[in-house]
Amino acid sequence: MNVGIIGCGIIGMKRAQTLGKHKLVIAVDKDISRAEAVAKECGCTKVSTNPMNAILNSDIDLMIISTTNEHLAQLTLESVIHKKHVLVEKPGGRTADELIPIIKEAENKNVFVKVGFNHRFHPALMKAKDWVKSGALGELMFIRGRYGHGGRLGYEKEWRADPKMSGGGELIDQGVHLIDLSRWFLGDLDVINSYAHTYFWDMPVEDNAFLMLKTKKDKVAWLHVSCTEWKNMFSFEIYGRKGKLIVDGLGGSYGVERLTYYRMYPTMGPPDKGEWIYNKKKDDSWQRELDYFISCIKLKQKPEGDITDAKKALDIVKTVYCNQ
C-alpha cells in the first residue's frame, strides 16, 4: 500500500519502521527535520510541513496520523473525506464528540479508521484473549487493571499537561488503553464510580484516575491509571469462574511481558499454574497492528479497535470528567 505519515515524532517513527514492503509516499511534520528522519528511514524523498500535501495526494491509500491530540480528529476527518483509510493514534481525539463526524464520514466514504490500540497486539494479551475465547476461564466475573509511569522532570510543562492540547490527563493518555482492553474482554461498560485527581504534578489535568465500570450483566472492571507510579508498571488481571489470567509488564521499563494462568479445580485448594514469558528486545505489537489493519482493508472487513471503539472509550472518559 501507499502510505502517508502525518506526525513524525517518536510514535510516527515507530509506525514508519513497521511499513516494510509498503511504500511511504510523504512524511509530514511541523518540524521538517523530524519529517526528514522518518522519510530517510523508509527511503522516501518527499517531506512537508503542511498536512494537506499528504491528504490531497491521490496516490496515498493509507494515512497514519500520530500528532498531538488536538490535531488527531481534524486530520483524520480530512483524510477520510478524501477517501483514505486511516490509522490514527489513540485516543483518536480529545473528546468523544470529535469522533462523531469521522464515524459518519467513514461510513459514507466506505473507508476504515483504525485507532492505535496496539496493546491488543501484545502477545500476552493476544494469548489471554484466546484463552478466554476457548472457555478455559469459564464465565468471566471481573477485571482488575493498573497502568502507570512516573513522569519525568518538566512533565508538568509538556503538551500532555495542557488540556487544550491533550483533552485531559493520565486518564485520556494511558487510561484509554485499560478501558479499551476491558471492553475487549467484557463488552460495553458503564461508569459506576470514579475519581480523578492531581496529587503530585503541578498541572491542570489529573495525574491519577480510579474507575469502577460495569456491564449490563454485572461484570466489573476496576481500573487505576497513574503518572505517579514511581516504578513503571502494567498489570491486567482477568477473573473467571474457573481460573484467572494475569498479564504483567509490556517490556522495556515496564518489565518483562508475562502471562500467568491459574486454573481452579472443582475441589478448590491450590490452583494449577502455567506461565509464558515474552522477553523480546523489540515491541512488535506495532507491526502486528499494522499488518492486521492492512489485511482488514484488503478483505474489506471492519477492523476491531476502530474509531467506534475509541468513541466508546472516550464516552467513559467524558463521564469521569463530568463527575468531578
Image (cartoon, rainbow, N blue to C red):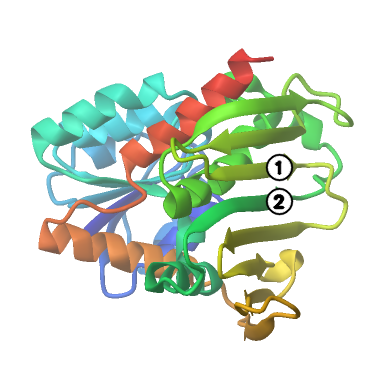
Q: Position of residue 188 (x, y in %)?
A: 41, 39
Q: Which of the two discs, 1 and 2, labels the residue nearer the N terminus?
A: 2
Quadrant of the rendered image containing residue 275: bottom right
Q: Position of residue 217 (x, y in %)?
A: 45, 40
User: Disc 1 designates what residue?
Assistant: 225
Considering only vertical position in the picture, is 202 above or below 307?
above
> What element does badge 1 sit on?
strand
Question: Which mark, by number, is residue 53?
Answer: none
Considering only vertical position in the picture, is 86 above or below 98?
below
Residue at image location 34% in from the left, 32% down from the top? 75
> What element does badge 2 sit on?
strand
Which residue type does callout 2 highlight? Arg
Observer-nearest of 118 and 78: 118
Considering only vertical position in the picture, is 22 above or below 279?
above
Which residue type does callout 1 highlight? Val
Residue 253 visible in the snapshot: yes
Observer-nearest of 58 and 193: 193
Quadrant of the rendered image containing residue 162: top right
User: Disc 2 designates what residue?
Assistant: 146
In the image, is 26 to the left or to the right of 117?
A: left
Quadrant of the rendered image containing residue 45: bottom left
Considering only vertical position in the picture, is 23 above or below 134?
above
In the image, is 106 to the left or to the right of 114?
A: left
Kindly indicate whether the residue at mark 2 contacts the one at mark 1 (C-beta within 8 angstroms). Answer: yes
Q: Residues within 10 Å of mark 1 (few under 14, many from 20)?
A: many
